[in-house]
Image: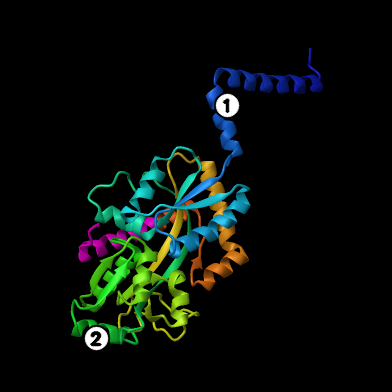
Amino acid sequence: MNTPPSRRSALRTGLRTGTALVAATAFPGLWSSAHAQAAWPTKPIRLLVPFAPGGSSEIVARSAAGEISKSLGQNVFVENKPGASGNIAMQECAASTDGHTMILGHIGTLAVNPYIFDKLPFDTNRDFRPISLLAKVPSLYVVNSDVPAKNLREFIALAKAKPGQLNYGSAGNGSAGHLAFEYLKMAANIFVLHVPYRGTGPQLTDLLAGRLDAASVGAPAILGHIKSGRLRCIATGTRERLPQLPDVPTVAESGYPGFEMTQWYGLNAPPSMPQAAIDRIAEACAKAMRNPLATERLRGDTAQPVGDTPAQYAAFITQEQARWKQVVARAKIKPD
C-alpha cells in the first residue's frame, strides 16, 4: 500500500531529527564542534601586532579591525606584542588553539625572518594560514632636518664622502626599514651604519631628536613629520611619485632604474582556525578595504588598500619570500 505524501514527509522529518539526536547523544564533542563552527565568532577576536605601537603596522591593523568588527558582529581588538623581530607574537599565534586569534602578517615576519634566523619555533608557511593582503605601504627615505642633503643624490654623495660616518635607524634587524635601507645601500654602493631599535616608535624618537641621520619608514608613520618640516623626505621607494609628496622623486628617478620598495601587511591565522572562519574574515577584509571611510583614511596616509583572497595572498607571500631571500643573503643580514 502506498504511503500518503504527507505521511512520507513526516517520516523523513522524524528520521532526520532522530538521526541528529542519536549523533548528539553518541558524539557530543562532534555536535558541539559543528555548532561552534556554525556560530563563529563566539567571542571577541584578538589581532596580534608583532611590533611596538606607533608605526604603520598599528595604523593598518586598527583601520582593518574596526571594519572587520562591523562585518562579523564581534569586537576585534588589537594587541601589540613586540620583540625578537616579531617572532614572539608569531610563536604565540602559531600555538593558539582558541579559533579566535590572528596576527598581522608583514614582509619582515613572513618573507625575511625565515632566512635570517637559523631556527624558528614554528614553520612560517605551515603554521600561518593566509587570510588576506590588507595594504601596501610605501617606504620613504628620510633624513633629519640637520642633515645637509636635500635629495637622494646629495645624500649618496655625502655617504660616499664620509663612509661609515652617517647612520640610519630601523625598527630592528630584519624589519622593513632595515631591508629598505640595505637594498638602497646595495644599489648605490654606499656604507651607512645601521642602528637597530625595538620598534618604529623608539626609532622615530631618536630620528626626530637628531640622534639618527636617516631612516626608511612606512609613509603613514612619518608623513605628518615630513609635512611639518621636522623630517626631510629625500626619495620614495614607489614606482611613481606619491600624490601626497609630488615634489619628491622616486629612488628610480634618482638614478637607480627598476628600484622599488614597499612594505605590506596582511592577516594570517594559526592552523586551529576553521576554514569557514578564514573565508568569513577574508570576505570582511575585502569589504573593509573597499569601505570609503577606511579607504580614505589609508590613502590619506599613502597606504594602498588591497583586500584579496587567501589564495592570492598565499601566492604573493611565496613571491616575496623568493625576492627577499636573495637580498638577505647578499646583505648578510643577521638577527639581533
Is residue 241 visible in this depiction of the protein? no
Position of the C terminus by quadrant:
bottom left
114 over 98 or under it: above or below: below
Name the residue beneath numbered marker 2.
Answer: 157
83 over 14 or under it: above or below: below
330 over 209 or under it: above or below: above
First of labels 2, 1 by sequence position: 1
Residue at figure coordinates x 33%, y 73% from the top left: 215
Question: Foreground: 125 or 7?
Answer: 125
| Residue farthest toward the top in the current orientation of the protein | 1
Question: Is 329 part of what is drawn in magenta?
Answer: yes
SS state under label 1: helix
**Residue 3 in the image, given as x and y percentages of width and height:** 78, 16
Question: Foreground: 307 or 120?
Answer: 120
Question: Foreground: 249 or 16?
Answer: 249
Left or right of 132 on screen, residue 165: left
Residue at figure coordinates x 39%, y 57% from the top left: 51
Amino acid type for the residue under numbered disc 1:
Trp
Question: Is 220 part of what is drawn in magenta?
Answer: no
SS state under label 2: helix
**Residue 31 in the image, given as x and y percentages of width and height:** 57, 26
**Residue 182 in the image, given as x and y percentages of width and height:** 26, 70
Amino acid type for the residue under numbered disc 2:
Ala
Per the model, the C-alpha gap separating discs 2 and 1 is 69 Å
| Dot 1 crowding, Cα within 10 Å, few <14, some 14–19, many 20+ | some
Q: Nearer the viewer, mark 2 or mark 1?
A: 2
Q: Give the range drawn in magenta.
A: 317-336
Residue at figure coordinates x 36%, y 78% from the top left: 142
Secondary structure character of the magenta stretch overall: helix
- When asked about the image quadrant of residue 11, the answer is top right
Q: Residue 31 carries which label?
A: 1
